[in-house]
Image (cartoon, rainbow, N blue to C red):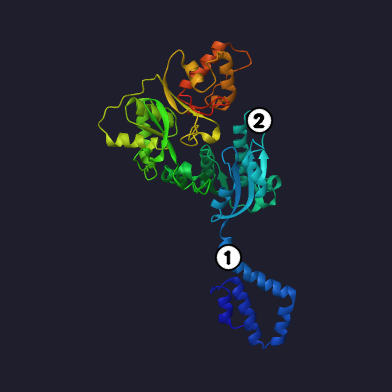
């Protein structure tokens, strides 16, 4: 085999296999080895297998440069595994995949078997936090002790060079910061991919890229369905404290083309804090409830609740009228964002212009605030259901959101009805919460 053909066989590169084979050719030429002897050696299985495996290794050099990924899926936030896996194809090879969920019968759990994903089903009253803790613990093992990770997750854990976290939760930013601290100490950590639905990042993609880049994390957006790149066919618009569902073309605004930078958002959040509308510590996003109350009080509207355009509206309001004297938060407004479950937080209860439940609204604080909210969310019926029963039902369905605000309402009778009502009243007005509240079971359409 002439050297020029041998070099061509190896892609024109002086790879280790090329050098070894060329050395063999020189040996046969210089020492006049009988060609039939070489052909005989080539015919032996061991020799032929060694040469062909080496050549194949050279042809796949580009593939070996890609990452060997451990995919960790937050099943409480991710509904389908297929788009997540597809989004990582260009990043490397998935050698380990685990699904953390509290629902053994969900779509994502059923899909786990199809893609050979190990389901980690966790049963707990405080399931959301336990799921996040388990995922974070496995991340720590993959980063700090691969031997232990291999014992728990399988031998593939030893070969992991990157971790992909698929979730809609931003709480993992704290974990990413800890990994950056470990890197600053000179210790090796795997590369990290943050996998999120494209619909959730489309308006803040540039800001997320800036944040994640500072943490050495790569953002990987994915499409939840084949139609995800299309614009939603409806929008939720709030005007004068009440919301309605409209066709997408109702507002002549390019909601998809509008973009704001991280610096613009941080400046807007700082102004909202000065005016009393915002008290949270995350300066990378404008809270929906703060934006709704600010735009409502200052008569800027209508407010686009869904898709997530309200953030752009707040930034544009401050930048277009820098000399305007803004009205501060009066302190008596309560924004309520009804949802059917954790998967419907962005679009509230709407799935189309004709199928929706109770939509977001703003109420003024009053002694009957609890009763008004329970009535609108379907817990307190005109037929005369007892208020205490309605409060118990509301707390049962919204226990997770109440705990997120530090509330621990008791339905066991240890506290009086007035005490539970006072706790609920404080939760509805709490500046700490996002005001996501689940509607009563069976509430499908808007009764207004």
Please give the label number shown on residue 124: 2
Residue 313: x and y in percent read 35, 36
Residue nearest the observer in this picture, 336 or 56: 336
Q: Would you name the residue on which mark 1 appears?
A: 61
Please give the label number shown on residue 155: none
Picture residue at 59% right of the left edge, 18% below the top: 392
Picture residue at 73% right of the left edge, 73% below the top: 46
Whether residue 185 is visible here, answered yes or no, is no
Picture residue at 66% right of the left edge, 69% below the top: 53
Q: Nearer the viewer, mark 1 or mark 2?
A: 2
Picture residue at 31% right of the left edge, 34% below the top: 318
Pointer 2: residues within 10 angstroms few (<14), some, or many (20+)? few
Whether residue 3 is visible here, answered yes or no, is yes
Residue nearest the observer in this picture, 202 or 278: 202
In the picture shown, does residue 135 fall above or below 327? below
Secondary structure of the residue carrying tag 2 is loop
Residue 26: x and y in percent read 62, 83
């Amino acid at each position: 085999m002439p050297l020029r053909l041998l070099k061509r066989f190896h892609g024109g590169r002086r790879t280790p296999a090329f050098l070894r084979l060329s050395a063999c050719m020189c040996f046969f030429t210089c020492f006049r080895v009988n060609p039939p002897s070489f052909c005989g050696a080539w015919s032996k299985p061991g020799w032929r297998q060694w040469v062909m495996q080496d050549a194949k290794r050279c042809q796949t050099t580009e593939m070996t440069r890609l990452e060997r990924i451990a995919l960790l899926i937050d099943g409480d936030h991710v509904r389908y595994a297929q788009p997540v896996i597809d989004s990582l194809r260009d990043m490397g090879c998935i050698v380990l995949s685990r699904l953390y969920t509290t629902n053994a019968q969900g779509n994502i759990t059923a899909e786990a078997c199809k893609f050979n994903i190990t389901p980690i089903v966790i049963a707990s009253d405080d399931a959301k936090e336990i799921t996040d803790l388990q995922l974070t613990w496995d991340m720590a093992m993959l980063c700090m002790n691969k031997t232990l990770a291999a014992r728990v997750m399988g031998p593939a854990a030893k070969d992991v060079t990157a971790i992909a976290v698929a979730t809609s939760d931003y709480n993992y930013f704290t974990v990413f910061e800890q990994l950056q601290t470990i890197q600053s100490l000179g210790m090796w950590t795997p590369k990290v991919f943050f996998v999120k639905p494209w619909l959730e990042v489309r308006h803040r993609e540039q800001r997320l890229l800036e944040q994640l880049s500072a943490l050495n994390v790569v953002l990987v957006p994915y499409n939840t369905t084949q139609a995800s790149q299309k614009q939603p066919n409806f929008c939720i618009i709030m005007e004068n404290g009440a919301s309605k569902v409209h066709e997408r073309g109702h507002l002549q605004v390019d909601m998809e083309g509008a973009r704001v930078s991280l610096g613009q958002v941080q400046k807007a959040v700082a102004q909202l804090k000065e005016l009393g509308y915002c008290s949270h510590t995350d300066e990378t996003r404008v809270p929906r409830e703060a934006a709704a109350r600010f735009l409502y009080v200052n008569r800027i509207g209508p407010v686009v609740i869904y898709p997530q355009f309200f953030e752009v509206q707040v930034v544009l309001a401050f930048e277009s009228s820098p000399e305007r004297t803004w009205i501060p938060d009066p302190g008596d407004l309560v924004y309520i964002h009804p949802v059917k479950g954790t998967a419907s937080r962005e679009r509230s209860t709407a799935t189309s212009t004709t199928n929706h439940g109770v939509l977001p609204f703003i109420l003024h604080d009053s002694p009957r605030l609890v009763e008004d909210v329970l009535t609108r969310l379907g817990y307190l019926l005109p037929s005369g259901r007892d208020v205490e029963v309605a409060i118990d039902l509301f707390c049962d369905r919204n226990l997770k959101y109440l705990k997120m605000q530090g509330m621990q309402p008791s339905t066991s009778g240890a506290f009086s009805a007035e005490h539970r009502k006072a706790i609920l009243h404080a939760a509805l007005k709490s500046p700490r919460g996002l005001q996501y509240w689940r509607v009563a079971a069976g509430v499908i359409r808007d009764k207004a």
